Image: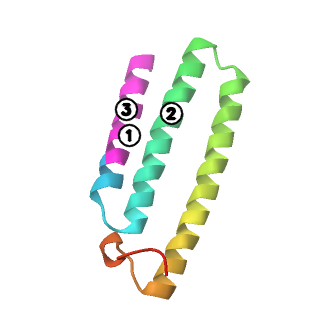
Amino acid sequence: MTLQSLLVVSAALFGIGVYGALSQQTFVMIMMGLELMLNGAMLAAVALWAMSTAGAPKGQLLTVIVMTVMAVEAALGFALVIGIYRIRKADMTEKLKRLRG
């Protein structure tokens, strides 16, 4: 697979993630859009490192760090969604008039 095709796939993932994050109203779908955006950026970084440095381990280490950050972000995000749902019974962004109080 060439670098250009990998970058096109990563740009498509990032674009789908942006659309998903901006067009959806439920918290879970917004978080899924953010995860797709991170996956697209991570794929681009891995493709650039794999094609330019012949698979140097520095790119792989950064990918593992980004995947760890993604897991923490997902866990915290879902904890916040569950907390908001328990308190306000709101699962969509439109149902929240304000977040304080």
Residue 61 forms part of the magenta stretch: no
Q: Which residues are magenta?
A: 1-18
Instruction: Tell me the element at label 2.
Output: helix
Q: Amino acid at mark 1?
A: Leu
User: Dot 1 corresponds to which residue?
Assistant: 13
In space, the residues marked 1 and 3 are separated at their CA atoms by 5 Å
Q: Which residue: 43% across, 47% down?
A: 36
Q: Which mark is residue 11?
A: 3
Q: Is residue 52 visible?
A: yes
First in sequence, mark 1 or 2: give its number.
1
* As drawn, 71 above or below 51: below
Q: Which residue: 50% across, 43% down?
A: 38
First in sequence, mark 2 or 3: give its number.
3
Is mark 1 in CB contact (under 8 Å) with mark 3?
yes
Badge 2: residue crowd in 10 Å (few <14, some 14–19, many ≥20):
many
Tell me where residue 27 sits by quadrant. Answer: bottom left
Tell me where residue 98 sits by quadrant. Answer: bottom left
Residue 53 x, y percent position in the rendering? 63, 13
Q: Amino acid at mark 3?
A: Ala
Instruction: Tell me the element at label 3.
Output: helix
Give the dominant element type of the magenta stretch: helix, strand or loop.
helix
User: Dot 2 corresponds to which residue?
Assistant: 43
Q: Which residue: 54% across, 69% down?
A: 78
Residue 82 x, y percent position in the rendering? 52, 78
In space, the residues marked 2 and 3 are separated at their CA atoms by 9 Å
Badge 1: residue crowd in 10 Å (few <14, some 14–19, many ≥20):
many
* As drawn, 95 above or below 23: below
Residue 13 x, y percent position in the rendering? 38, 40
